[in-house]
Image (cartoon, grey):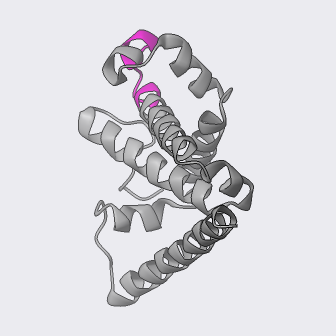
Amino acid sequence: MEEGIPLKPLGKEEIHKLEYSLLISSLIEVVTDPKFVDQLRDPKDRLTWIDSIATAAAALARDKAGMTLSEIAEDIGRTEATIKKHLKGETEAGKIVLEAYKKLEKGEIDNTLSLVLGLKKAESMKEVVDKLEEIAKSLDEASKSLREVIDRLSK
């Protein structure tokens, strides 16, 4: 893995780097996966999804830093039961965030996220262009998914 995203964070700054990486990766997964499109139609459900994924990402980042369940719950303002469910993958958001962490461990998404989050400097202009093209492709896919939701809502 590259230096950018710490898998075992030490201190608040590294916790936040991992948390943001998990959050962004997970949100991209949700908006680009057709199986979630129907669930995102209702604005209330969208907000619930975003909150749940943010909570799961925050919990996992703190867990990987070695914080206890009660410390995590207090730090992010959720109950220990909620944190435990996310960390065990008993919630859909927890499953998505755990999968994002596995991809980070394997190095499957670290380079792109490191560049996007500004955690790593590009070695060449070609690398920047390649990463921007990857991001544009992901955004196109997300846009198509959102267009499907809009089309369904307007029927």
Where is residue 133 drawn, in percent x and y?
48, 83
Viewer-closest of 129 and 144: 144
Q: For the view shown, which residue lies furthest in the right direction?
A: 35
Q: Is residue 70 magenta?
A: yes
Q: Residue at x 55, y 12 (%)?
A: 81
- Give above or below for 39 relative to 137: above
Viewer-closest of 29 and 107: 29
Where is residue 89 drawn, in percent x and y?
66, 30
Q: Residue at x 55, y 79 (%)?
A: 137
Quarter occupied by residue 10: top left
- Give above or below for 54 relative to 89: below
Q: For the view shown, which residue lies furthest in the bottom direction?
A: 126
- Give above or below for 88 relative to 136: above
Where is residue 142 drawn, in percent x and y?
57, 68
Viewer-closest of 33 and 39: 39
Q: Is residue 75 magenta?
A: no
Q: How many marks?
A: 0
Q: Residue at x 51, y 73 (%)?
A: 139
On screen, residue 38 versus residue 137, left or right, reads right
Overall secondary structure of the magenta stretch? helix
Residue extent of the magenta highlight = 62-72
Picture quarter with the C terminus: bottom right
Where is residue 108 drawn, in percent x and y?
58, 61
